[in-house]
Image: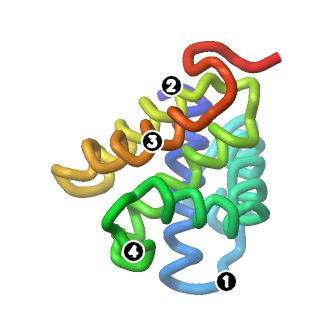
Amino acid sequence: MGVRREGREAAVQYLYLREVNGECDLESFYKFRGLSPAARRFTGELVAGTMKEQEGIDETIRKSAQNYELNRISAVDRNILRVAIYEMLHCPDTPPVVSINEGIEIAKKYSTEESGRFVNGVLDQVRSSLARPARTAAN
């Protein structure tokens, strides 16, 4: 598994753990998860950015997940969406389609059978509102 995929998965796992259990130590999580230094750096960037921008990200989810209340979306799917949307909105070096594909694959691995389609639908709504190319990094 690549460093960025591992970092995305770890970020989703940490944010899920934090949401379900409350405050938890990121360094202890890194040790438990056995992340490489590079994966730790990427995970840390995603976690810090997602937490900082969570209010706006959650509003984006509310607008894009038509007919779904945020609290009715599973905690796993909600955190997958948060990380992917953070990347789409705040990481111009990552093409939006990469964030979408990664979100779908993580949902298939860690959530329900239907989650991949749900995550794809929400993230595609977000992508359609972006003012940058979907397949290339913004400069």
| Badge 3 amino acid | Gln
Q: Is residue 31 visible?
A: no
Label 2 belongs to which residue?
97
Callout 2 secondary element: helix
Quadrant location of the C terminus in the rendered image: top right
Residue drawn 57% across the image and 28% down it? 96
Q: Which mark is residue 69?
A: 4
Where does residue 122 sit, x and y in percent of width and height? 40, 48
Q: Which mark is residue 125?
A: 3
| Badge 4 amino acid | Glu
Which mark is first along the chain, 2 or 3?
A: 2
Label 1 belongs to which residue?
23
Q: Tell me, yes or no, whether the two marked residues, 3 and 4, touch with CB atoms within 8 Å.
A: no
Which mark is first along the chain, 1 or 2?
A: 1
Q: How far is disc 4 from disc 2 in space, using C-alphas?
A: 25 Å
For residue 95, above or below residue 46: above
Q: Is residue 100 left or right of residue 55?
A: left
Callout 4 secondary element: loop
Q: How far is disc 1 from disc 3 in space, using C-alphas?
A: 31 Å
Q: Quadrant of residue 56?
A: bottom right
